[in-house]
């Protein structure tokens, strides 16, 4: 890919995949006759997914409009794929390389739908407007811990905050800073803090998550002054509006690394998250669990509750414990206590 080399590991995975497919076609699998007329297998990167059509970046950095073999299910932005040309500027995705991480979001039926694959990090973008929601941050951090990637908090629209308002917000974010999540103060409007953000994003594949209107797309524009207009043109051709982001899209950062823009969410459903993920997302509470007098302690009003003691000592923020209790109750109700 342009400005982007497949790692040896990725090349190995693609090679194994191609070998496997070749063995299969040697055995003349029925129903694969329709592959006649397709070009040779090539590696590509899924840039964005508009339902039936996936935009794949080929080895030369060109964008190819591809359909997807039905047995592959839905692709995610950031998927490494094998595709075969079927005509100029387009083709068919015939295989997906094993994902090293996958973020999902429930669809309208509550089924997990892939959003982004092969992430190293998720940046939770916050802003004074729309006002930040700690509940939402907590849910994001659980989802981030569940897929095993790094998390960073990015407070955008710094230009809207005077010193007093900033101090209030920093106070609210203190529990996360104590859990060692980096916090970057930025403004896509004034470019404040963008160098630090660039440095943090360099060399990884990161996804920008956060409520609608916090400025995710604005940050991407600020980080990529020469934002790929081909992608805009392709998105426009699919009939989606330009302002609110409607499909996750991957951009290459000039300094190396990739950045995925996602549509904002109002309420972030828990999707595939289970009870064991909860403790990982609550690194401030987890060390105290299992230290209570009763092994089935609910950490409410039980005597000798290590969690409540930690709250009294100021080691756990009460709001975080409330949030933990709420999420746990929600997961138990949904029967996800696995
Ligand atoms: N004052 C100020 N406004 C900003 C800043 N960044 C973005 N905005 C404004 O915030 C609004 C929303 O910005 P977007 O970038 O579209 O937000 P988004 O997070 O991509 O929203 P969705 O795509 O709906 O999820 C726009 O009106 C931007 O001009 C900033 O740093 N300062
Ligand atoms: Mg957007
Ligand atoms: Zn307890």
Image (tube, rainbow, N blue to C red):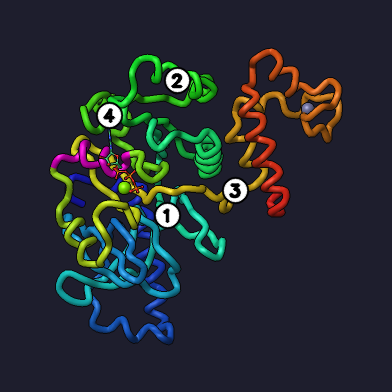
Residue drawn where x is 55% and y is 37% of the image: 135
Instruction: Let me know if residue 260 appears in the view.
Output: yes
Say which of 220 and 56 sits in front: 220
Mark 2 = which residue? 170
Q: Which of marks 1 and 3 is nearer the N terminus?
A: 1
Q: Which of marks 4 and 3 is in front?
A: 4
How far across and down, in percent of the image, does residue 80 sit?
Answer: 34, 56
State the CA–CA distance, disc 4 to disc 3: 32 Å
The residue under label 3 is 273
Marks 3 and 2 sit apart, C-alpha to C-alpha, by: 28 Å
| Residue under numbered circle 1 | 115
Residue 222's spot in the image, x, y percent? 21, 37
Q: Determine the CA span between mark 1 and mark 4.
A: 26 Å
Is label 1 or label 4 in front?
A: 4
* Disc 4: which residue: 187
At x 40%, y 73%, the residue is 23
Q: Which of marks 2 and 1 is nearer the N terminus?
A: 1
Task: Tell me the magenta residue range.
Answer: 215-225
Query: How far across and how far down the image is residue 53, in percent?
Result: 31, 69
Q: Is residue 205 left or right of residue 73?
A: left
């Amino acid at each position: 890919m342009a400005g982007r080399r497949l790692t040896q590991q990725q090349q190995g995975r693609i090679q194994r995949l191609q070998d496997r497919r070749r063995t299969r076609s040697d055995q003349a699998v029925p129903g694969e006759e329709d592959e006649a007329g397709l070009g040779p297998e090539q590696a590509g990167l899924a840039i964005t997914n508009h339902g039936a059509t996936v935009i794949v970046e080929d080895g030369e950095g060109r964008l190819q409009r591809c359909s997807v073999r039905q047995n592959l299910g839905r692709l995610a932005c950031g998927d490494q794929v094998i595709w075969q040309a079927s005509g100029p500027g387009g083709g068919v995705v015939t295989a997906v390389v094993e994902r090293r991480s996958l973020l999902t979001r429930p669809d309208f039926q509550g089924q997990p739908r892939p959003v982004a694959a092969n992430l190293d990090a998720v940046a939770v973008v916050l802003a004074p407007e729309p006002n930040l929601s700690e509940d939402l941050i907590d849910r994001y951090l659980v989802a981030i811990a569940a897929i095993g990637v790094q998390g960073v908090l990015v407070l955008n629209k710094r230009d809207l905050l005077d010193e007093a308002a900033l101090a209030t917000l920093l106070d609210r974010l203190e529990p996360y800073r104590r859990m060692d999540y980096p916090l970057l103060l930025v403004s896509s409007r004034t470019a404040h803090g963008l160098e630090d953000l660039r440095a943090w994003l360099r060399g990884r594949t990161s996804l920008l998550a956060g409520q609608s209107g916090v400025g995710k797309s604005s940050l991407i524009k600020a980080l990529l002054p020469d934002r790929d207009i081909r992608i805009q043109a392709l998105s426009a051709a699919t009939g989606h509006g330009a302002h609110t982001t409607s499909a996750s899209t991957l951009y290459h950062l000039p300094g190396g690394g990739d950045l995925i823009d996602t549509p904002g969410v109002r309420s972030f459903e828990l999707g595939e998250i289970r009870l064991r993920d909860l403790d990982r997302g609550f690194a401030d509470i987890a060390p105290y669990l299992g230290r209570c007098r009763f092994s089935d302690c609910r950490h409410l009003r039980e005597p000798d509750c290590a969690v409540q003691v930690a709250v009294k000592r100021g080691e756990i923020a009460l709001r975080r414990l409330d949030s933990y209790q709420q999420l746990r109750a929600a997961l138990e109700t949904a029967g996800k206590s696995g």
